[in-house]
Image (cartoon, rainbow, N blue to C red):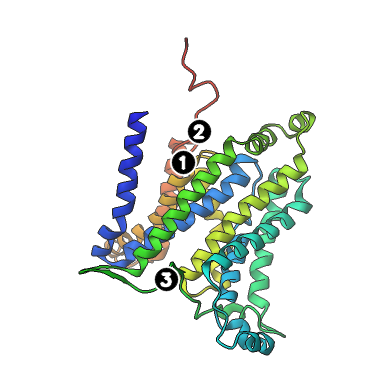
Amino acid sequence: MKMTRTNLIIGAILALILPLVLQSFGNAWVRIADMALIYVMLALGLNIVVGFAGLLDLGYVAFFAVGAYTYGLMASPQLTDAFPAIAAMFPEGLHMPLWLILPVGAAVAGLFGMLLGAPTLKLRGDYLAIVTLGFGEIIRVFLNNLDHPVNITNGPKGLNQIDSLKFFGIDLGRPLTIGNFEIASVSLYYYLFLVLVVLSVVICHRMELSRVGRAWMAIREDEIAAKAMGINTRNMKLLAFGAGATFGGVSGTLFAAFQGFVSPESFSLMESVMIVAMVVLGGIGHLPGVILGAVLLSALPEVLRYLAGPLQAMTGGRLDSAILRQLLIAVAMIVIMLMRPRGLWPSPEHGKSLKAK
């Protein structure tokens, strides 16, 4: 127990000083850490659906998009420019605060999650994956085309001029100076994201140990037996879709505020595949493994961006650096899955943790 507590304290200290160290090498490295934290929240949300309830969801990026566009519409000039009535109601523009947009984005995404779950209650496996995949693409196509006859999403051009987050009077879009030390904007975002990630981990852990979490796991192992035991599988599935989508909505609002710009191309099928890969690579259903998988798969492509250039030069420029980077990621994932088929940090098997008395 002491060792675990010591590890937690060391990990917390390292997490707190990480952005301050990285910003000395350039803000690009802190941005990588920021995006890694956003993907950790996304992976934790998808783990509720895939890991706890055993429902394969390939359209999870749709909830990420819903959260991002909810923030983008409520914190940018888009709606006031498109609708004179809204401009008259808000003459200074829509600049909704974080405490309002965050729950709204989570609620809207959760509602979409339950709307997706309702018609798919009887589907399992490949059929469920195909339907959720279609849902994710439908959302992206809608966002791409809702610019006429009334311009709501600005179509493929996306939403820009999105407000930065303001937290307790501190504008996270600007550096904060304390004495002679300056904390970069990306580092301020890092600390907010870190707090929300810790909160997300606590919520997921409590859900896993709750009666609802046990019901999800029973459905995952054997849905017919779970129903025979009196579990309302319909409601539990809807709750899993809704809860997972809520995490996606929160992540989307943070992403939109951090980037200051969102477009439909940010929410492609490849993003959904990558989020599923994070959960599978780390260890399905195991929170530490999911976090590890999310950090590795979100940071690895950016780190390899710096290695792909020299490798391209070694090949005489015959291989494009972007293609080479994707090749290295694919090779790394294949090697890891061959060596660790249950993930890098899988959940302990039943009975393995019990000590013989």
Residue topped by disc 3: 169
In space, the residues marked 3 and 1 are separated at their CA atoms by: 36 Å
Q: Which label sits in the foreground, 3 or 1?
A: 3
- Left or right of 99 in this view: 214: right
The N terminus, quarter of image: top left
Tell me, yes or no, if residue 319 can be seen here. no
Disc assigned to residue 13: none
Q: Label 1 is placed on what type of residue?
A: Gly
On the image, the x and y values in percent for residue 43 come to 52, 50
On the image, the x and y values in percent for residue 69 come to 59, 71
Farthest residue in the top direction?
357
Verify CB contact (< 8 Å) between mark 2 and mark 1.
yes
Disc 1 is placed on an element classified as: helix
Q: Label 2 is placed on what type of residue?
A: Ser
- Left or right of 35 in this view: 14: left
Q: Residues within 10 Å of mark 1 (few under 14, many from 20)?
A: many
Disc assigned to residue 289: 1
Verify CB contact (< 8 Å) between mark 3 and mark 1.
no
Question: Which residue: 42% across, 51% down?
Answer: 295
Mark closest to the chain's N terminus, 3 or 1: 3
Q: Is residue 300 above or below residue 168?
A: above
Disc assigned to residue 347: 2
Residue 25 sits in quarter: bottom left
In space, the residues marked 2 and 1 are separated at their CA atoms by: 8 Å
Q: Label 3 is placed on what type of residue?
A: Gly
Disc 2 is placed on an element classified as: loop
Verify CB contact (< 8 Å) between mark 2 and mark 3.
no
Tell me, yes or no, if residue 138 can be seen here. yes
